[in-house]
């Protein structure tokens, strides 16, 4: 008998994967926006930290957004043949 395929071993849907990548990109770019605004108000070493964040975070955001989830290592097995179901006889009165 073949091993039953678990629904959790199926790969993520393209919509879920795209949504996850968009959220990662948006979060990273939001942090970058905070760094840019902070560059206007901080001084000293904090200014360098915020400027470095504003410069480096776009690269990180693009790398995260372009990373695609790895497919599962086990192949997805197709279900077996369709078994026809006969309707039951109506009850006799």
Image: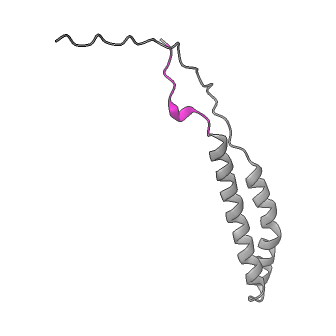
Q: Nearer the viewer, residue 22 or 55?
A: 22
Look at 70% across and 70% down and name the residue there: 30
Q: Main secondary structure of the magenta part?
A: loop
Q: Nearer the viewer, residue 85 or 43?
A: 85
Snapshot colouring? one colour
Magenta run includes residue 3: yes
In the rendered structure, which segment of residues is drawn in magenta? 2-12
Q: In the rendered view, would you say 65 is above or below 90? A: below
Query: In the rendered view of the protein, which quadrant contains the C terminus?
Result: top left
The image quarter containing residue 15 is top right
Rendered location of residue 92, percent (x, y): 19, 10
Look at 81% across and 77% down and name the residue there: 51
Rendered location of residue 91, percent (x, y): 22, 13
- Work out which residue is located at the far left of the displayed protein and give it: 93
Q: Nearer the viewer, residue 77 or 35?
A: 77
Q: In the rendered view, would you say 15 is above or below 48? A: above
Magenta run includes residue 8: yes
Q: In the rendered view, would you say 23 is above or below 9? A: below
Q: Nearer the viewer, residue 52 or 4?
A: 4
Rendered location of residue 2, percent (x, y): 50, 14
- Judge from the rendering whether residue 39 lies leftward or rightward of residue 80; answer left or right: right
- Judge from the rendering whether residue 26 lies leftward or rightward of residue 79; answer left or right: right
Rendered location of residue 61, percent (x, y): 76, 60
């Amino acid at each position: 008998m073949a091993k039953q395929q678990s629904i959790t071993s199926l790969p993520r849907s393209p919509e879920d994967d795209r949504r996850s990548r968009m959220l990662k990109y948006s979060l990273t770019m939001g942090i970058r926006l905070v760094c840019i605004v902070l560059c206007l108000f901080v001084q000293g070493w904090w200014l360098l930290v915020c400027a470095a964040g504003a410069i480096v975070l776009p690269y990180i955001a693009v790398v995260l957004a372009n990373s695609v989830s790895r497919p599962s290592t086990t192949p997805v097995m197709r279900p077996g043949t369709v078994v026809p179901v006969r309707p039951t006889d109506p009850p006799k009165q």
